[in-house]
Image (cartoon, rainbow, N blue to C red):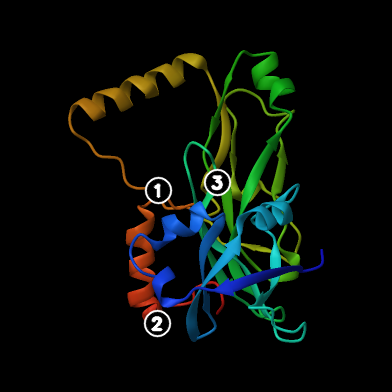
Amino acid sequence: MENIALAVEKRNDSEIKSNASRRLRNKNYIPAVVYGLKEEPVSVKIRGKEFKGLLKGRSIYSLIFDMHVDGAKKNKKETVLIKEFQRDPITREFLNVDFLRIQMEKEIETTVPIHIINEEVAVGIKESGGVLQHGLRELHIYCFPADIPEYIEYDIKDLDIGVTVRVSDINISDKIKILNDPEEVVVSIIHPTQLKEEEVAVEEGAEEGIVEPEVIGKEKVEPEEEKAKQKEEGRSREKDSRGK
Protein backbone atom coordinates (compact mmCIF):
# COMPACT_ATOMS: atom_id res chain seq x y z
CA MET A 1 0.00 0.00 0.00
CA GLU A 2 1.32 3.43 -0.95
CA ASN A 3 1.72 6.14 1.65
CA ILE A 4 -1.18 8.59 1.83
CA ALA A 5 -0.55 12.31 1.35
CA LEU A 6 -1.92 14.31 4.27
CA ALA A 7 -1.95 18.12 4.42
CA VAL A 8 -1.99 19.68 7.89
CA GLU A 9 -1.60 23.17 9.31
CA LYS A 10 0.46 24.31 12.28
CA ARG A 11 -1.54 25.53 15.24
CA ASN A 12 -0.74 29.04 16.44
CA ASP A 13 -0.28 29.93 20.10
CA SER A 14 -3.94 30.75 20.67
CA GLU A 15 -4.96 27.36 19.20
CA ILE A 16 -2.85 25.48 21.74
CA LYS A 17 -4.25 27.15 24.84
CA SER A 18 -6.84 25.60 27.15
CA ASN A 19 -10.25 25.07 25.53
CA ALA A 20 -8.88 25.91 22.07
CA SER A 21 -9.35 22.33 20.88
CA ARG A 22 -13.11 22.61 21.24
CA ARG A 23 -13.13 25.79 19.17
CA LEU A 24 -11.07 24.07 16.48
CA ARG A 25 -13.49 21.16 16.33
CA ASN A 26 -16.38 23.58 15.99
CA LYS A 27 -14.64 24.81 12.83
CA ASN A 28 -14.34 21.19 11.61
CA TYR A 29 -10.66 20.86 12.46
CA ILE A 30 -9.11 17.99 14.40
CA PRO A 31 -6.30 19.01 16.79
CA ALA A 32 -3.25 16.78 16.47
CA VAL A 33 0.36 16.41 17.60
CA VAL A 34 3.34 15.06 15.64
CA TYR A 35 6.30 13.67 17.60
CA GLY A 36 9.07 11.08 17.54
CA LEU A 37 12.57 10.48 16.14
CA LYS A 38 14.01 12.75 18.85
CA GLU A 39 12.61 15.84 17.12
CA GLU A 40 10.52 18.57 18.69
CA PRO A 41 6.78 17.86 18.81
CA VAL A 42 4.62 19.98 16.54
CA SER A 43 1.00 20.91 17.25
CA VAL A 44 -1.05 20.79 14.07
CA LYS A 45 -4.67 20.75 12.93
CA ILE A 46 -6.33 18.61 10.26
CA ARG A 47 -9.42 19.38 8.23
CA GLY A 48 -11.92 16.89 9.63
CA LYS A 49 -13.85 16.19 6.44
CA GLU A 50 -10.70 15.56 4.41
CA PHE A 51 -9.22 13.31 7.08
CA LYS A 52 -12.36 11.16 7.31
CA GLY A 53 -12.33 10.87 3.54
CA LEU A 54 -8.78 9.53 3.58
CA LEU A 55 -9.71 6.93 6.21
CA LYS A 56 -12.87 5.73 4.47
CA GLY A 57 -12.68 2.02 3.70
CA ARG A 58 -9.22 1.68 5.27
CA SER A 59 -7.90 0.31 8.54
CA ILE A 60 -6.60 3.11 10.76
CA TYR A 61 -4.04 0.78 12.31
CA SER A 62 -1.92 0.22 9.20
CA LEU A 63 -2.07 3.57 7.44
CA ILE A 64 1.17 5.43 6.75
CA PHE A 65 0.99 9.10 5.83
CA ASP A 66 3.33 11.47 4.01
CA MET A 67 2.51 14.57 6.03
CA HIS A 68 2.92 18.02 4.48
CA VAL A 69 2.80 20.91 6.93
CA ASP A 70 1.43 24.28 5.79
CA GLY A 71 1.58 23.47 2.10
CA ALA A 72 5.15 22.17 2.15
CA LYS A 73 6.50 20.97 -1.18
CA LYS A 74 6.27 17.30 -2.09
CA ASN A 75 9.88 16.59 -1.16
CA LYS A 76 9.41 18.24 2.26
CA LYS A 77 7.36 15.72 4.15
CA GLU A 78 7.33 13.69 7.32
CA THR A 79 6.42 10.03 7.25
CA VAL A 80 4.05 9.28 10.11
CA LEU A 81 1.50 6.81 11.38
CA ILE A 82 -1.28 7.16 13.93
CA LYS A 83 0.01 6.37 17.40
CA GLU A 84 -3.10 7.17 19.46
CA PHE A 85 -6.44 8.84 18.94
CA GLN A 86 -9.52 9.85 20.88
CA ARG A 87 -13.10 9.74 19.61
CA ASP A 88 -16.37 11.03 20.96
CA PRO A 89 -18.09 7.99 22.52
CA ILE A 90 -21.43 8.91 20.96
CA THR A 91 -20.77 10.56 17.59
CA ARG A 92 -17.46 8.70 17.00
CA GLU A 93 -15.99 11.92 15.63
CA PHE A 94 -12.24 12.32 16.15
CA LEU A 95 -11.41 14.57 19.10
CA ASN A 96 -7.64 14.46 18.63
CA VAL A 97 -4.92 12.40 16.96
CA ASP A 98 -1.28 11.68 17.81
CA PHE A 99 1.06 11.02 14.89
CA LEU A 100 4.40 9.28 15.31
CA ARG A 101 7.30 10.07 12.99
CA ILE A 102 8.82 6.93 11.49
CA GLN A 103 11.48 5.84 9.04
CA MET A 104 10.40 3.31 6.43
CA GLU A 105 13.73 1.49 6.60
CA LYS A 106 13.54 0.91 10.38
CA GLU A 107 11.37 -1.65 12.18
CA ILE A 108 8.83 -0.36 14.69
CA GLU A 109 6.45 -1.67 17.33
CA THR A 110 2.73 -1.26 16.79
CA THR A 111 -0.61 -2.96 17.39
CA VAL A 112 -3.08 -4.49 14.93
CA PRO A 113 -6.59 -5.84 15.54
CA ILE A 114 -7.47 -9.53 15.49
CA HIS A 115 -10.45 -10.47 13.31
CA ILE A 116 -12.20 -13.69 14.33
CA ILE A 117 -14.10 -15.22 11.38
CA ASN A 118 -16.69 -17.99 10.96
CA GLU A 119 -17.99 -17.63 14.50
CA GLU A 120 -21.53 -18.46 13.31
CA VAL A 121 -20.44 -21.88 11.95
CA ALA A 122 -17.86 -22.80 14.59
CA VAL A 123 -18.27 -26.43 15.65
CA GLY A 124 -18.28 -25.62 19.34
CA ILE A 125 -21.04 -23.05 18.90
CA LYS A 126 -23.26 -24.47 16.16
CA GLU A 127 -23.11 -28.12 17.18
CA SER A 128 -22.23 -28.04 20.88
CA GLY A 129 -24.06 -24.88 21.96
CA GLY A 130 -20.96 -23.19 23.31
CA VAL A 131 -20.37 -19.47 23.77
CA LEU A 132 -17.47 -17.52 22.26
CA GLN A 133 -15.25 -15.81 24.80
CA HIS A 134 -12.74 -13.20 23.63
CA GLY A 135 -9.34 -12.63 25.17
CA LEU A 136 -6.95 -10.44 23.19
CA ARG A 137 -8.53 -8.24 20.54
CA GLU A 138 -5.25 -6.95 19.12
CA LEU A 139 -1.66 -8.06 18.83
CA HIS A 140 1.51 -6.16 19.62
CA ILE A 141 3.88 -6.64 16.68
CA TYR A 142 7.33 -5.63 15.45
CA CYS A 143 8.06 -5.14 11.75
CA PHE A 144 8.91 -2.66 9.02
CA PRO A 145 6.19 -0.03 8.44
CA ALA A 146 5.45 -1.35 4.94
CA ASP A 147 4.68 -4.81 6.39
CA ILE A 148 2.07 -3.69 8.93
CA PRO A 149 -1.13 -5.63 8.16
CA GLU A 150 -4.59 -4.05 8.35
CA TYR A 151 -5.57 -6.86 10.72
CA ILE A 152 -4.71 -10.44 11.63
CA GLU A 153 -7.40 -12.97 10.76
CA TYR A 154 -8.13 -16.20 12.63
CA ASP A 155 -10.67 -18.78 11.44
CA ILE A 156 -12.51 -20.64 14.24
CA LYS A 157 -14.87 -22.80 12.15
CA ASP A 158 -13.19 -25.99 13.46
CA LEU A 159 -12.89 -24.77 17.05
CA ASP A 160 -14.74 -27.05 19.46
CA ILE A 161 -16.15 -26.33 22.89
CA GLY A 162 -13.54 -26.31 25.63
CA VAL A 163 -10.72 -25.41 23.24
CA THR A 164 -8.60 -22.29 23.74
CA VAL A 165 -6.68 -20.39 21.06
CA ARG A 166 -3.50 -18.76 22.29
CA VAL A 167 -1.06 -16.33 20.71
CA SER A 168 1.26 -19.23 19.92
CA ASP A 169 -1.47 -20.74 17.70
CA ILE A 170 -1.53 -17.78 15.33
CA ASN A 171 0.41 -18.14 12.11
CA ILE A 172 1.69 -14.92 10.63
CA SER A 173 4.15 -13.73 8.01
CA ASP A 174 7.80 -14.30 8.88
CA LYS A 175 8.27 -10.57 8.26
CA ILE A 176 6.32 -9.87 11.43
CA LYS A 177 7.27 -10.70 15.00
CA ILE A 178 4.51 -11.01 17.62
CA LEU A 179 5.60 -9.50 20.94
CA ASN A 180 2.74 -10.78 23.10
CA ASP A 181 3.24 -13.62 25.56
CA PRO A 182 2.68 -16.85 23.55
CA GLU A 183 0.38 -18.15 26.30
CA GLU A 184 -2.03 -15.20 26.20
CA VAL A 185 -5.57 -16.24 25.29
CA VAL A 186 -7.00 -14.92 22.03
CA VAL A 187 -10.35 -16.69 22.01
CA SER A 188 -12.08 -19.78 23.38
CA ILE A 189 -15.45 -21.53 23.25
CA ILE A 190 -16.90 -22.32 26.66
CA HIS A 191 -20.09 -23.84 28.01
CA PRO A 192 -22.85 -21.27 28.73
CA THR A 193 -22.94 -22.25 32.41
CA GLN A 194 -19.24 -21.46 32.73
CA LEU A 195 -19.85 -17.98 31.33
CA LYS A 196 -22.66 -17.44 33.83
CA GLU A 197 -20.42 -18.48 36.71
CA GLU A 198 -17.77 -16.00 35.58
CA GLU A 199 -20.33 -13.19 35.37
CA VAL A 200 -21.52 -13.94 38.90
CA ALA A 201 -17.92 -13.90 40.17
CA VAL A 202 -17.34 -10.50 38.56
CA GLU A 203 -20.52 -9.10 40.11
CA GLU A 204 -19.53 -10.38 43.54
CA GLY A 205 -16.09 -8.86 43.16
CA ALA A 206 -17.63 -5.48 42.30
CA GLU A 207 -19.83 -5.63 45.39
CA GLU A 208 -16.75 -6.22 47.52
CA GLY A 209 -15.10 -3.12 46.11
CA ILE A 210 -12.60 -4.80 43.82
CA VAL A 211 -11.41 -2.35 41.17
CA GLU A 212 -10.57 -3.67 37.73
CA PRO A 213 -7.20 -2.50 36.33
CA GLU A 214 -7.31 0.12 33.59
CA VAL A 215 -6.89 -1.25 30.11
CA ILE A 216 -4.67 0.95 28.02
CA GLY A 217 -5.22 0.75 24.30
CA LYS A 218 -4.64 2.63 21.11
CA GLU A 219 -7.84 4.61 21.42
CA LYS A 220 -7.58 6.87 24.44
CA VAL A 221 -10.55 7.88 26.56
CA GLU A 222 -8.92 10.29 28.98
CA PRO A 223 -10.12 13.94 29.08
CA GLU A 224 -8.81 15.61 25.95
CA GLU A 225 -7.74 18.91 27.45
CA GLU A 226 -5.66 17.24 30.17
CA LYS A 227 -4.09 15.04 27.53
CA ALA A 228 -3.16 18.03 25.40
CA LYS A 229 -1.61 19.80 28.37
CA GLN A 230 0.54 16.80 29.20
CA LYS A 231 1.78 16.56 25.63
CA GLU A 232 2.75 20.21 25.34
CA GLU A 233 4.58 20.21 28.70
CA GLY A 234 6.26 16.84 28.66
CA ARG A 235 6.61 15.56 25.10
CA SER A 236 10.34 16.31 24.94
CA ARG A 237 10.90 13.70 27.64
CA GLU A 238 8.78 11.01 26.05
CA LYS A 239 10.54 7.91 24.86
CA ASP A 240 9.80 6.76 21.33
CA SER A 241 9.02 3.10 22.02
CA ARG A 242 7.79 2.38 18.51
CA GLY A 243 10.46 4.19 16.59
CA LYS A 244 13.46 2.51 18.10
Q: Amino acid at mark 2?
A: Ser
Where does residue 217 sit, x and y in percent of width and height? 47, 52
Q: Amino acid at mark 3?
A: Glu
- Taking the image as shown, residue 35 lies to the left or right of residue 115, namely left
- Which is more toward the observer, 121 or 44? 44
In which quarter of the view is residue 111 placed?
Answer: bottom right
- Element class at badge 3: loop
Nearer the observer, disc 1 or disc 2?
Answer: 2
Alpha carbon separation for disc pair 3 and 2: 28 Å
Name the one closer to the observer, 221 or 130: 221
Q: Amino acid at mark 1?
A: Val
Residue 56 visible in rendering:
yes
Q: Quadrant of the N terminus?
A: bottom right
**Relative height, residue 217 to residue 197 (above, below):** below
Q: Identify the residue position indicated by label 3 in the image.
A: 93
Whichever of labels 3 and 2 marks the residue nearer the N terminus, that label is 3
Is residue 7 left or right of 189 when viewed as pictured?
Answer: right
Please tell me which of labels 3 and 1 falls first in the chain.
3
- Circle 1 Cα neighbour tier, 10 Å, few/some/many (<14 / 14–19 / ≥20): few
Which of these two is toward me, 52 or 20?
20
- In the picture of the structure, the residue carrying the numbered disc 2 is 236
**Residue at (45%, 14%) from the top-left corner?**
193
Q: Is residue 218 visible?
A: no
Residue at the spot 49% in from the left edge and 52% down from the top edge: 26
Q: Horizontal and vertical percent for residue 35?
A: 51, 76
Q: Quadrant of the C terminus?
A: bottom right
Name the residue tied to disc 1: 215
Q: Describe the element under mark 2 as helix, strand or loop.
A: helix
Above/below status of 44 relative to 169: below
Looking at this view, name the residue that lies furthest to the left: 208
x and y, in percent, of residue 183 in the image: 52, 49
